[in-house]
Image: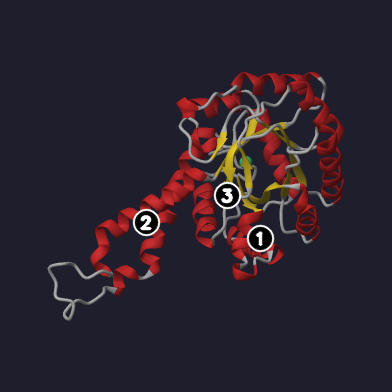
């Protein structure tokens, strides 16, 4: 079922208490929603779908109408999840920068999402706190939860590009959480957006624990969020969860999976649409039973579903749905 903001809050509280991680997966297409929700459901896990500003514009087609795109993705998520009463899935806005403030408010007021991320991390700390607090006040009035961030996460994800890495300072994290009252806090601890390998990342897992301990010691415990988690090893992610992370963002890994699955299909089935060199073009017949998009797009969908299932087993969210 589709989770409200308050139910999503319950999911993250349970995850924090029992130290497991919720997999937050970026979506644009209906096929991704199907793959992910079926995957979460298959392993009895709750989950989060997230849409970036770029994804919403893409979903709207040539008009790039971000609000229409958000309504479309939200409708797909809501209708599809209705089929699974024992698996809770929410919808989140990923990395909305302050220039998308009106868009965030629109999604909150129209009940399109369960949670939102306001990413004002490029602003000064003072300005970041001011903007984030404003979003928190509006969101909480509607029962929607909010993720905030300080520090930059290196790499590029959609419209978010940063050449530099700036590790989050624990004392700034404490000030930020206290003053904004965000529900989820994204710390910058050395992960990268995009394609990376675990061994090349200067990951500060100790910093996650330091931030978590400091927040707990000051009575403002929160779920921490790990961005750029696609390139990390299972062990790195499990340590991050043990140290206080409750939300692991996944985008790049799925993209690579989907491309690889479709590529493998067409490498094998090329002659369904391309005349082989040893066949005369006048006798060649394309094969509808193999070029029907349902035949090859399903390969991407199945691969993505398998991947999210393995993520949930790795993060411990499997068999831990609040709806069981
Ligand atoms: Zn991110």
Please state if 146 lies on the left or on the right of 262 as rendered: right
Residue found at x 54% / y 62%: 30
Please tell me whether mark 3 sits on a helix, a strand or a loop. Answer: strand
Real-space Cα distance between discs 1 and 3?
13 Å
Report the residue marked by disc 2.
Answer: 262
Report the residue marked by disc 3.
Answer: 26
Residue 225 image position (x, y, % from top left): 65, 35
Real-space Cα distance between discs 2 and 1?
26 Å
Q: Along the polypeptide, which appears first: circle 2 or circle 1?
A: 1
Residue 262 image position (x, y, % from top left): 37, 56
Label 2 crowd bin: few (<14), some (14–19), many (20+), radius 10 Å: some
Residue furthest out toward the left: 278
Report the residue marked by disc 1.
Answer: 74
Label 1 crowd bin: few (<14), some (14–19), many (20+), radius 10 Å: many
Residue 163 image position (x, y, % from top left): 60, 36
Answer yes or no: disc 2 within 8 Å of ligand 1.
Answer: no
The answer to whether one can see residue 181 in this image is no
Q: Is residue 154 above or below residue 28?
A: above
């Amino acid at each position: 079922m589709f989770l409200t903001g308050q139910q999503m809050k319950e999911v993250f509280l349970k995850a924090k208490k029992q130290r497991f991680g919720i997999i937050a997966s970026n979506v644009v297409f209906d096929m991704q929603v199907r793959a992910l929700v079926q995957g979460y459901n298959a392993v009895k896990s709750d989950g989060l779908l997230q849409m970036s500003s770029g994804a919403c514009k893409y979903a709207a087609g040539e008009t790039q109408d971000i609000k229409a795109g958000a309504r479309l993705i939200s409708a797909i998520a809501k209708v599809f999840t209705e089929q699974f009463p024992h698996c809770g899935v929410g919808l989140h806005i990923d990395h909305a920068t302050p220039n998308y403030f009106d868009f965030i408010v629109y999604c909150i007021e129209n009940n399109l999402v369960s949670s939102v991320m306001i990413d004002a991390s490029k602003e000064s700390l003072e300005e970041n706190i001011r903007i984030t607090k404003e979003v928190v006040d509006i969101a909480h009035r509607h029962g929607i939860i909010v993720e905030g961030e300080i520090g930059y996460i290196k790499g590029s994800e959609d419209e978010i590009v940063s050449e530099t890495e700036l590790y989050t300072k624990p004392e700034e994290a404490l000030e930020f959480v206290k003053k904004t009252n965000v529900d989820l806090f994204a710390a910058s601890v050395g992960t990268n957006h995009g394609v990376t390998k675990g061994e090349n990342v200067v990951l500060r897992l100790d910093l996650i624990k330091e931030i978590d301990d400091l927040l707990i010691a000051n009575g403002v415990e929160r779920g921490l969020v790990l961005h750029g988690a696609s390139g990390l090893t299972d062990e790195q992610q499990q340590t991050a969860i043990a140290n206080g992370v409750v939300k692991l963002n996944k985008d790049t890994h799925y993209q690579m999976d989907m491309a690889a699955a479709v590529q493998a299909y067409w490498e094998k089935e090329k002659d369904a649409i391309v005349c082989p060199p040893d066949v005369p073009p006048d006798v060649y017949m394309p094969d509808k039973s193999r070029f029907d998009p349902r035949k090859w797009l399903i390969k991407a969908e199945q691969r993505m579903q398998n991947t999210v299932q393995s993520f949930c087993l790795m993060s411990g969210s499997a068999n831990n749905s609040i709806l069981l």
